[in-house]
């Protein structure tokens, strides 16, 4: 790390210029620097308070960074939203640009526009003159520039707004597919910029996944005693001194001076700034991804004692998401408990080529750009190995695999190609089921007329369509994950197999993480979050559901118990001629035993 070297003559000339014409110097600096501009127009916060940097030193470097592709992994309430808005106002005041500022929901838009943006404008004489439109909560004009505030709940919010800049606030809490649509709004711009920032949720997802690809800038402080540069870490740098927790050097224990820090890139070659020649013409454009971990512990208005008390409260809280929220919102780092987590080691360590040939097969198929299918074998010892899997572009070929492996039952993802999935269901003579997750948009349309079950279930039977299941996404994924964690499910391949398809299967099975999120009322709910391609994980989930359908007990018992009570139609026809309802049950011959009493 080296300090910036400034030509002494240039510094002397600048100092003389400021002394001779301080007002002119202030106006000149306001043209080239947003912080100088904020000072020059006397900009204040929405509460009417001066914007200060004494306790917000890390923000100074962020204000001066206009790299076109930026990522901020941050904690809550440390000033990044305010920083982004002030930079946009400065750019809009000096250039002719259009920005789209995206929040997770439309409600977030109105709360921000009315509660934070409008008071800043109304409280500043200069901005009131420059703003040509401020009454509309979702659309603002400053000079010749426009700012559109949008929620990310609907794709229509992103249509027909060509833009130069896209700012995504709370990136992790907005639907990724909708954000992709917003990104396309920049394609016509000559100088597009995208800034993403959010409190993180889980590792390798959302803002954390983006930050991992950047140059990864961290705020480092230097110990006055041992000269050790370090990133302040809650677990290494917070220690009790005479009953009060303080930030100290993790190496020698001296109190840290957090204001004397600098931004340092862990991977400096991953992002470069634009280079201009002496006449101001662009010589080389900026490249790569610029990323900041905005560490809340680097801000001096935050004390170690207060942060420690917050941790103690979270550690002893009965709320399911308390510890996770501390990591995400108070420390700005991703967190996962490890509960119900399938890892690549989980799959690899349990692999073996052998399985009991007695029993029967079930089928699961997930839709995407292509179809991913699996065949799961239900063995008499209770194990459920994956004996076959693959991909295909053809629904007909998927059905051929279903027949080829003599699968008794199967479940196929209903979306996005619902018509093709329904054709397979009809062709199977009711041996295949179509399935929706209940939180899918299409599923909600199918469930309008569904009668609510008397007891909570993992899945229910749709009365809108035959052979259609409505799945509780979290509950079913929990159940199928437990099969792998407990060792009941495994991949029937040699453990040392390096086959490309095997590796793809393993990676996709491990590409979902179980998270706990709280809604606006503080009610915790389980969500499974995708961290990469996860088609085999869903195909396995569908196969597990098919296995449960095949082994739940006599049909007459469905109305009184079981985790999937009341899901099957009363009349059964699998295409093999007249059948009694009990024919759905496993046969003794499936397991090579004379009677089920032998269990």
Image (cartoon, grey):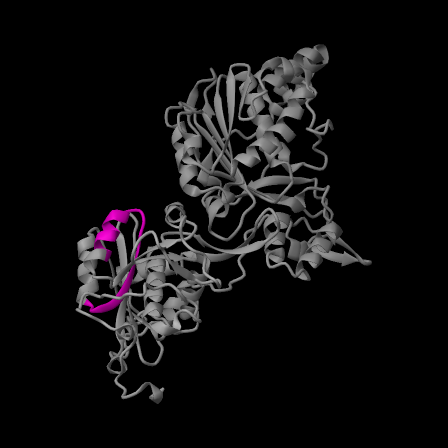
Quadrant where the image shows the N terminus: top right
Left or right: where does residue 482 sit relative to residue 260?
A: left
Q: Quadrant of residue 47?
A: top right
Frontmost residue, 134 versus 37:
134
Name the spot of residue 224 as percent of width and height, x first. 72, 47
Q: Residue 317's image quarter?
A: bottom right
Residue 297 pos. (x, y %): 67, 46
Camera-side residue of 437 and 45: 437
Whether residue 419 is situated above or below residue 83 in the rendered picture: below
- Residue 513 on image: x %, y %: 46, 57
Quadrant, the C terminus: bottom left
Is residue 150 among what the camera can see?
A: yes
The vertical placement of 330 against 350, above or below, is above
Residue 4 visible in image: no
**Magenta region: which residues?**
405-425
Name which residue lies at 36% across and 78% down.
382
Residue at image location 38% in from the left, 46% down from the top? 445
Q: How many numbered marks have been drawn onto this rendered protein structure?
A: 0
**Residue 124 versus residue 423 in the image, above or below:** above
Residue 250 point in image, percent of width and height: 67, 56
Q: Is residue 359 magenta?
A: no
Return the residue nearer the eye: 518 or 454: 454
Q: Is residue 245 left or right of residue 337?
A: right
**Which residue is at the far right?**
242
Q: Quadrant of residue 63?
A: top right
């Amino acid at each position: 790390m080296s300090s910036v070297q400034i030509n002494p003559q240039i510094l002397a000339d600048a100092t003389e210029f400021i002394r001779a014409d301080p007002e002119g110097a202030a106006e000149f600096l306001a043209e080239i620097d947003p912080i100088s501009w904020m000072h020059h127009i006397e900009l204040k916060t929405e509460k009417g308070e001066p914007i200060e940097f004494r306790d917000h030193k890390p923000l100074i470097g962020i204000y001066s960074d206009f790299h076109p592709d930026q990522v901020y992994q941050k904690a809550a309430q440390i000033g990044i939203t305010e920083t982004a808005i002030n930079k946009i106002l400065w750019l809009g005041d000096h250039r002719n640009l259009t920005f789209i500022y995206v929040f997770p929901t439309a409600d977030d838009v109105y709360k921000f526009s009315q509660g934070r943006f409008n008071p800043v404008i109304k409280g500043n004489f200069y901005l009131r003159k420059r703003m040509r439109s401020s009454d509309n909560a979702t659309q603002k004009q400053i000079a010749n520039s426009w700012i559109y505030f949008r929620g990310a709940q609907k794709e229509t919010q992103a249509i027909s707004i060509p833009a130069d800049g896209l700012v995504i606030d709370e990136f992790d809490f907005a639907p990724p597919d909708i954000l992709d649509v917003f990104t396309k709004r920049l394609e016509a711009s000559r100088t597009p910029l995208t800034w993403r920032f959010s409190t993180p949720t889980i590792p390798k997802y959302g803002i954390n996944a983006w930050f991992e690809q950047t140059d990864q800038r961290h705020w480092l402080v230097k110990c006055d005693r041992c000269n050790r540069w370090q990133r302040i870490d809650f677990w290494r740098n917070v220690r009790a001194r005479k009953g009060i927790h303080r930030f100290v050097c993790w190496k020698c224990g001296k109190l840290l001076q957090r204001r004397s820090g600098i931004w340092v890139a862990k991977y400096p070659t991953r992002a470069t700034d634009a280079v201009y020649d002496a006449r101001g013409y662009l010589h080389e454009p900026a490249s790569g991804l610029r990323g900041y971990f905005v560490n809340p512990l680097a801000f001096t208005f935050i004390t170690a004692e207060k942060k420690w008390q917050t941790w103690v409260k979270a550690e002893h809280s009965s709320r399911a998401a308390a510890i996770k929220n501390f990591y995400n919102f108070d420390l700005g780092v991703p967190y996962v408990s490890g509960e119900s987590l399938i890892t690549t080691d989980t799959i690899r360590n349990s692999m073996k080529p052998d399985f009991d040939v007695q029993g029967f097969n079930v089928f699961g198929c997930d839709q995407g750009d292509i179809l991913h299918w699996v065949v799961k074998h239900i063995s008499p010892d209770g194990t459920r190995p994956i004996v076959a899997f693959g991909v295909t572009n053809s629904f007909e070929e998927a059905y051929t695999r279903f027949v080829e492996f003599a699968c008794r039952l199967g479940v196929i993802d209903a979306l996005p190609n619902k018509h093709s999935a329904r054709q397979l269901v009809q062709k199977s003579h009711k041996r295949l089921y179509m399935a929706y997750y209940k939180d899918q948009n299409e599923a909600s349309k199918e469930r309008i007329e569904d009668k609510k079950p008397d007891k909570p279930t993992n899945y229910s039977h749709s009365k809108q369509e035959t052979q259609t299941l409505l799945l509780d996404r979290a509950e079913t994924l929990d159940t199928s994950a437990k099969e792998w964690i407990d060792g009941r499910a495994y991949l029937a391949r040699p453990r040392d197999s390096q086959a490309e398809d095997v590796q793809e299967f393993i990676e996709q099975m491990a590409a979902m993480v179980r998270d706990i999120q709280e809604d606006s009322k503080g009610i915790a709910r389980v969500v499974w979050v995708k961290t990469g391609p996860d088609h085999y994980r869903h195909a396995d989930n569908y196969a597990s559901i098919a296995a449960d359908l095949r082994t739940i007990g006599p049909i007459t018992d469905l109305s009184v118990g079981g985790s999937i009570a009341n899901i099957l139609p009363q009349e059964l026809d699998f295409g093999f001629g007249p059948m009694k309802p009990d024919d759905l049950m496993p046969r003794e011959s499936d397991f090579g035993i004379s009677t089920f009493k032998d269990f």
